[in-house]
Amino acid sequence: MADAVEAGKIKAVGVSNYSAEQMRLAHAALAERGIPLASNQVEYSLLHRQPETNGVLEACRELGVNLIAYQPLASGALTGKYAPGARVSGLRRFMMSQFRGKGLETVAPVVALLREIGGRYSKTPAQVALRWLLEKENVLPIPGAKNGLQAAENAGALSFALASAEVEALDQATLAWRR
């Protein structure tokens, strides 16, 4: 990758799903050539907070690397469009625990808090969930969008800020997902 940067074929080097140790190794190898490691793309959301406990977020901050959060809306579980007891179709039902069994019931209090906070700003649960990530140092969410309306809604997360008490409330409400 360093050769590609030096040849002008790419502008930056990022990695995906690297552990803290792997990221440190990549950072050191690139630094020997004077090239920074730009990013590590990992799953991170209110319902998947492992980067906070496995050292990845800390290493990103220490090394000046951006954490790019994929699935920041937990495959739609944080949007508020799935009600507890609803039968979810497609891959969500088979591959994601928050959509199986009592998963939506477990997520419901988090969505309720997102709605409550969003109501203060005229924002959706999805926008508040994205804003929670944006409030974190060195974190950039990359939400998916199936259409222009979803893309515009996602962009709405950029138009407000959460109070520190609101960030803390969301942190506390989702402690179970830090494992």
Image: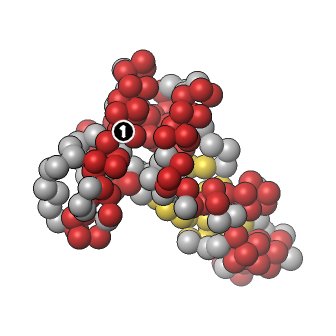
The residue under label 1 is 109
Q: Residues within 10 Å of mark 1 (few under 14, many from 20)?
A: few
Label 1 is placed on what type of residue?
Pro
Asked if one can make out residue 81 in the rendered structure from this viewpoint, the answer is yes
Q: Quadrant of residue 49?
A: bottom right
Q: Position of residue 47 (x, y in %)?
A: 44, 53
> Which is nearer the eye, 6 or 117?
117
Residue 63 in the figure: left or right of residue 8: right
Please tell me which residue is depicted at 38% across the width and 54% down the height of the picture.
74
Horizontally, residue 65 falls left or right of residue 71, namely right
Q: Is residue 61 left or right of residue 149?
A: right
Instruction: Please provide percent x and percent y for residue 168.
Output: 59, 34
Q: Is residue 60 above or below residue 119?
A: below
User: In the depicted view, which residue is nearer to us: 94 or 138?
Assistant: 94
Question: Closer to the camera, 143 or 50?
Answer: 50
In the rendered view, does 73 fall on the left or right side of 1?
left
**Quick check: 80 above or below 25?**
above
Number of numbered callouts drawn: 1
Give residue 144's position: percent from left, percent from top. Answer: 36, 53
Could you say which quadrant of the image residue 17 lies in? Answer: bottom right
Residue 1 is situated, as x and y percent measured from the top left of the image, at 67, 79
User: For the view shown, which residue lies furthest in the top direction?
Assistant: 120
Residue drawn at (49%, 40%), measured in percent from left and top?
173
**Residue 45 seen by the camera:** no
Q: Residue at x 56, y 41 (%)?
A: 171
Q: Secondary structure at mark 1?
A: helix
* Residue 55 in the image: above or below residue 129: below
Residue at position x 42%, y 57% from top?
Answer: 71
Q: Quadrant of the C terminus?
A: bottom right
